[in-house]
């Protein structure tokens, strides 16, 4: 089997999580600068087999677009252009950053670590991926 990769896309930073090859466990992979998003994925996909890409879709509670929705839609277009062979699916990302911060608090991370937005983005991607796996 191949991995599933999940993306928490942002204007500055992008958090990335992946499953193990058996698609049982979601693990944070990294957070990258968004400008390096496609080159990073090209390199990663050259080393690892990925069967699906999940990307968090930011929406309001009434399912209307947020200020970040156009950014994510543009990222999806880039993904489809660069990796047409890999299916892309959107997942709800509402409250994942808050859930990530809560998880960091529960893990006992220091205040300085909880302020690390890179770590928040990576954990948010992991939460989205773990929720997806739980629904499968």
Image (spheres, rainbow, N blue to C red):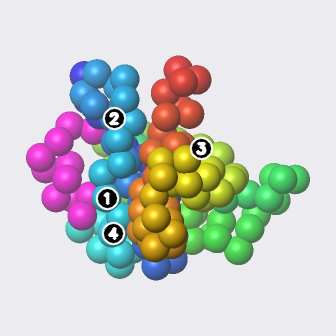
Using the image, tell me which numbered label, if any, was put on residue 32: 4
Residue pictured at 16% horizontal, 58% vertical:
43
* Mark positioned earlier in the residue sequence (3 or 4): 4
* Residue in front for this viewpoint, 79 or 3: 3
Eyeballing the image, is 40 above or below 13? Answer: above
Left or right? Give the position of 66 relative to 130: right
Per the rendering, the mark at residue 30 is: 1
Give the alpha-carbon distance from disc 3 to disc 2, as whole Å. 15 Å
| Among the 4 quarters of the image, the one containing residue 128 | top right
Q: Which residues are magenta?
A: 40-51
Q: Residues within 10 Å of mark 2 (few under 14, many from 20)?
A: many
The residue lying toward the viewer, choosing from 83 and 97, is 97
> Going from the N terminus, do you reach mark 3 or mark 2 first?
2
Location of mark 3 (residue)? 91
Identified at 28% across, 22% down, the residue is 22
CB-based contact (under 8 Å), mark 1 and mark 4: yes
Report the residue at 57% width, 71% height from top: 71
Q: Position of residue 21 (x, y in %)?
A: 25, 28
Report the disc number at residue 19.
Answer: 2
Viewer can see residue 90? no
Q: Earlier in the sequence, mark 1 or mark 2?
A: 2
Which is the main secondary structure of the residues drawn in magenta? helix
- Up the image or down, 82 lies above or below 47; here it is below
Point out the tag, 2 or 4, that comes first from the N-terminus: 2
Q: Nearer the viewer, residue 92 or 115?
A: 115
Where, quadrant-wise, is the N terminus in this rendering? top left
Left-right relation of 85 to 110: left
The disc, 1 or 3, on the residue closer to the chain's N-terminal end is 1
User: Mark 3 or 4, which is nearer the eye?
Assistant: 4
- Taking the image as shown, residue 14 lies to the left or right of residue 30, namely right
Q: Callout 3: few (<14), some (14-19), or many (20+) C-alpha neighbours within 10 Å?
A: some
Secondary structure at badge 2 equals strand
């Amino acid at each position: 089997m191949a991995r599933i990769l999940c993306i928490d896309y942002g204007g500055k930073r992008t958090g990335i999580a992946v499953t193990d090859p058996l698609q049982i466990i979601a693990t944070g992979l990294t957070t990258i600068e968004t400008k390096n998003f496609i080159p990073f994925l090209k390199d990663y996909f050259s080393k690892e087999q990925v069967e699906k890409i999940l990307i968090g879709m930011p929406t309001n509670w009434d399912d209307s677009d947020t200020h970040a929705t156009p950014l994510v839609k543009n990222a999806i277009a880039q993904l489809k252009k660069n990796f047409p062979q890999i299916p892309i699916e959107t997942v709800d990302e509402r409250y994942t950053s808050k859930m990530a911060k809560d998880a960091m608090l529960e893990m006992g991370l220091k205040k300085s670590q909880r302020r690390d937005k890179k770590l928040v983005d990576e954990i948010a991607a992991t939460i989205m991926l773990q929720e997806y796996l739980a629904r499968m």
